[in-house]
Image (cartoon, rainbow, N blue to C red):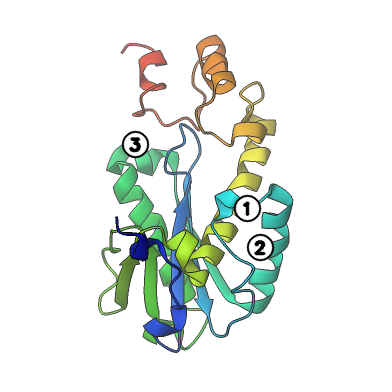
Amino acid sequence: MKNSEWQPVDWRNYGEWVIGVDEVGRGCLAGPVYASAVLFTHGALEKEVTDSKKLTEKRREELAIKIREQHIVSLGFATEDEIDRLNILKASLLAMRRAVEGLTTLHEQAPRAAIVIDGNQKIPGLDPLRQSTLVKGDLRCAPISAASIVAKVTRDQLMKNQAVLYPGYGFEVHKGYLTAAHRAALQKQGPCAIHRKTFSGVKELLPIR
């Protein structure tokens, strides 16, 4: 990719009303994939937001509150069962579609807004809404960055709650991603109900039927 393609993008170039969309949890072994759609109606916070992975947990949580206060936010998710049935790409796109569809009921301008999606895949089933994709959009475009932050904070809190229901896996720490500790817990305890049964690292440990 050329250096110019990594540069920040002025979200206003897409139109007066812009919806940023991003997902989180695609690479996890456990838990749902979450998506957020954020309708930017003004420039509040655009200098503060960036890719959620580049922020501390505390800063993400602070910004998520501000984003919800100052912009219009909708969330969508796809469950572990949907991920196993559809595959992770289709499930991620489903979560994003649900987030956008939810947003269209929250603000009268949302159906007319330009949708900007992190990555290179448009969301099926949203015609006639206008969609654009932006590689590394969570770093380059403020509405997508905002969506990234809200999605991650929401999913992280869910996984902390799941850690109480499914102790011993360390979900409160790794949030379902593969770490040495997570692998060791899987080897010791086997998969639990929220593990993705079709994912490598999990499926090998399932009982043979």
Q: Position of residue 67 (x, y in %)?
A: 64, 70
Residue bearing mark 2: 64
Between discs 1 and 2, the one toward the N terminus: 2
Residue 182, position as x, y percentages in the image: 56, 22
Instruction: Tell me the CA gap for discs 2 and 3.
Output: 29 Å
**Would you name the residue on which mark 1 appears?**
153
- Label 1–label 2 contact, CB within 8 A: yes
| Quadrant where the N terminus is found in the figure | bottom left
Counting residues from the start of the chain, the first of labels 2 and 3 encountered is 2
- The image quarter containing residue 12 is bottom left
Q: Helix or strand or loop: what does disc 2 sit on?
A: helix
* Residue matched to label 3: 84
Look at the image and tell me in which quarter the C terminus lies.
top left
State whether residue 164 is above or below residue 149: above
Secondary structure at badge 3 equals: helix
User: At 57% across and 54% down in the image, what residue appears?
Assistant: 52
Instruction: Tell us which disc is closer to us: 3 or 1.
Output: 1
Count of numbered circles on the image? 3
